[in-house]
Image (tube, rainbow, N blue to C red):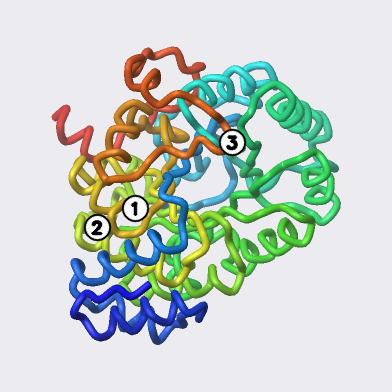
Amino acid sequence: MVYETGNRTVDDAVRRVLDGETLDRRDGLALIAQPVDAVAAGADAVRAALGDGTVDACSIVNAKAGNCAEDCGFCAQSVHFDTGIDDYGFLGAEKILEAAKRAERDGSQRFGIVLAEKGVSKERRPEEWEEVLEAIRLVRDETDVEVDASLGILTEEEAAILAEEGLNHYNHNIETSPRYFPEVVGTHSFEDRVETLEVAKEAGMDLCAGVILGMGESPTDRVDAAVALQDIGVASLPVNVLNPVAGTPMAERGLPDITTEEVVRTVAVYRLLHPDARVRLTGGREANLDTEGQVAALEAGADGILTGDYLTTEGQSPADDIEIVEEAGLEPNTGTNEFDPERVKERGDDATAPETAAGSAQSNAELQSDG
């Protein structure tokens, strides 16, 4: 395949990727400095050549909310910050199955069980550990979606058990570059996160690990995060965009809003650096990008989304997401869950989601609007 944007840097990168070469940090830094239209067009050409023309949807459930001992500066669930969210212990396997069935009905291909804590612990909290395993088994056995999880730090034994139970992807975001990470989190290190990803991968699980844009990081940090993910080896790369929750340090810093152009350009560079991964638009996208901006990000090489609600904030309806996917000239993935996109659109948002902490956090934008 020959594709030319007229931009020498982009065209050379596209040619090399399609020839099977892996781009490096130097390439990433050059690409992120290029005009957004050129790099987006080049990234879309790579997606078209190497992808399947579909957008893969995943959904998550906040299975245990709040009271987390970690101090991640963006997170509404940290015990260090007063955010006023709903908090609760483990939801229980049946409620998690209910959420998974709704995700399946709404077109998700995979479903993530998320716990807000440093790490699920087989030794320290054996009852909770067994509940997590029960939930994984129920979702695995009673739905067609693939089961993922984000359970914090893992031991080798825990990772091996999760893989044996059929956990598909393990999610553990690196959030940002190694350099900028200490500006975001103080209670654990970047290396701690990488170690858990390596443990999960060694156990046989695919990795879902990505970033949050708009936390004050530089374009170089965005490239360095992508390069770190190359070294780790990820199958799914979620691109979150900060939606500052009132009460968190990131909300109090008064960070400038990230522009649509910055998000689209970064997505495009991530596609070029990770040609075989699902580059996934996730938390905060609808708060930072209008419909046109979300379409532009999909047209810049993204081929995955997180649909429905997030952990403590609300997301878009699956019906709206399908419309956006189709507007970008792509199709919803039906490879795992053979759902009918038209039925999802007809149903719209019927507000039948299980009650969780989603929607209990207030962003700075919402507070300003209320005020």
At label 1, which amino acid type do we have? Met
Residue 146 percent coordinates (x, y) = 64, 37
Point 19% across, 57% down: residue: 259
Label 2 secondary element:
loop
Identify residue for label 2. 255
Mark 1, Cα crowd under 10 Å, few <14 / some 14-19 / many 20+, is many
Residue type (three-letter) at the residue carrying disc 3: Thr
User: Closer to us: mark 2 or mark 3?
Assistant: 3
Left or right: 318 in relation to 225 = left
Between 241 and 247, the one nearer to me in the picture? 241
State the separation of the CA atoms marked 2 and 3. 40 Å
Left or right: 199, with 4 as reference point: right
Residue 163 drawn at (x, y percent): 78, 46
SS for tag 1?
A: helix
Query: What is the x, y in percent for residue 27?
Result: 38, 83
Q: CA distance from mark 3 to mark 1?
A: 37 Å
Q: Which residue is mark 1?
A: 250
x 68%, y 45%: residue: 168
Query: Which quarter of the rendering shows the C terminus?
Result: top left
The residue tagged 3 is 336
Q: Is residue 292 left or right of residue 162?
A: left
Query: Which mark, by number, is residue 107?
Result: none
